[in-house]
Amino acid sequence: MNILVTGGAGFIGSHTVVELIAYGHTPIIVDNLSNSHENVIINIEKIVNQKILFYKQDCRDKQKMDTLFSNHQPDGVIHFAAYKSVSESVDKPLLYWENNSNSLLTLLEMTEKYETPFFVFSSSATVYGDPEELPLKETAPRKPSTNAYGATKQTGEDMLQTLCLTPHSKTKGISLRYFNPIGAHPSGLLGELPLGVPQNLVPFITQTAIGLREKLTVFGTTYPTPDGTCLRDYIHVLDLAQAHIYALTHLTKINSPTYDVYNIGTGKPSSVMEMIQTFEKISGVSLPYVLGPKRQGDVASCYADVSKAKKDLLWQSHFSLQQALIDAWKWQQSLK
Ligand code: UD1
């Protein structure tokens, strides 16, 4: 299938492009490079040993998107392109609404106009807010979001759902709710490129280990968890990338209008302290860290029930936490 991958030069997008090719599909990347680099395209081409179709353009540019849909008639869209910092979205909510919602709206308009059969939307476990029951099932309620980033993910899911479930709809859709993507491509050619000081745990760990940051602060040690630090569901980015191909394949087997949501995680919780200890073990580096106060907005525990994805999509994660950290560390060292 010809698959339009918006944000295909980003962290998850670039790994998904590699997987699409491994499964025999033809990706077409659209990325405005606002939070990535043209080198990523070159590195994808090195890994897959072929040229990649890439358009440096913005998903909000309706005219350009129309031309692209008209020229390529994609069979499916995987929509990654979005702003993704929770803290920035608290500072600049309208920036998030403008970019994330208008990008998706334009793509859905094109999807409707060109009767694109399949659409996969990048959503997040953040749509659940603070969970009442763990592990999180897809049936858990979506709590009102405390930040614009999370709110755009919730409305993004709703926008796709309403398009897919109109009686005349030609588009089948899935929202994938990612838990915590980490790791990198084992080649050391692709990985996460945080701008400035990383907000997420694993990039902060690897940057500290290599000496770019003085020390890691553990945000909170009195949570109601076995060691007092937060529990999360960390998933290797290649496992996450593969889930998109399984989601597309699943949609090809359904003959009526459909929309559904799936948790994409490992189902295994790890605490911040466990992450530090595992990283020290795989890298041989003693990580400087201090115990600090809670970060505002963090929930104590968040991990997935992954049985729905396993049953319907026939997908499950394979990489271990150790492997994900080995690959993240290799990527950090390659950036040197
Ligand atoms: C964060 C976002 C989430 C987003 C996800 C994308 C917040 C509140 N949530 O999730 O909406 O979908 O990233 O990857 O920003 N930690 C430290 N020290 C650090 C950094 C993190 O102790 O320097 C801890 C955090 O308190 C948390 C865990 O590590 O318990 C994971 O943090 P992070 O990687 O930022 O992910 P989330 O907060 O789960």
Image (cartoon, helix red, strand yellow):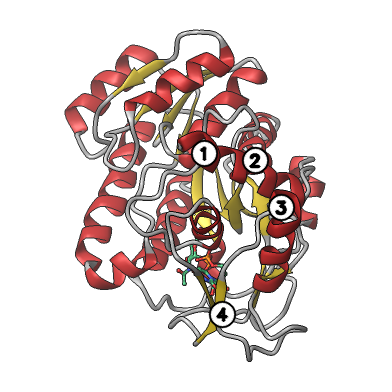
Q: Nearer the viewer, mark 2 or mark 4?
A: 2
- Using residue 283 as the reference point, say whether residue 294 is left or right of it: left
Front residue of 57 and 253: 57
Q: Nearer the viewer, mark 1 or mark 4?
A: 1
Up-down relation of residue 287 to residue 211 (above or below):
below
Within 10 Å of disc 4 (Cα), the crowding (few <14, some 14-19, many 20+) is some
User: Residue 310: where, in percent of width, then height?
Assistant: 80, 48
Q: Residue at x 59, y 58 (%)?
A: 180
The quarter of the picture where the N terminus appears is top right
Q: Residues within 10 Å of mark 3 (few under 14, many from 20)?
A: few
Quickly name the residue at label 1: 191
Q: Residues within 10 Å of mark 2 (few under 14, many from 20)?
A: many
Q: Which residue is mark 3?
A: 284
- Between 255 and 92, which is closer to the camera in this rendering? 92
Where, quadrant-wise, is the C terminus in this rendering? top left
Q: Residue 299 shows which numbered tag? A: 4
From the image, tell me which residue sits under label 2.
Answer: 327
Q: CA distance from mark 1 to mark 4?
A: 26 Å
Looking at the image, which residue is at 55% across and 59% down? 205
Q: CA distance from mark 1 to mark 3?
A: 21 Å
Q: Is residue 196 above or below residue 188?
A: below
- How many numbered marks appear? 4
Residue 277 in the figure: left or right of residue 155: right
Quadrant in the rendering for residue 81 = top left
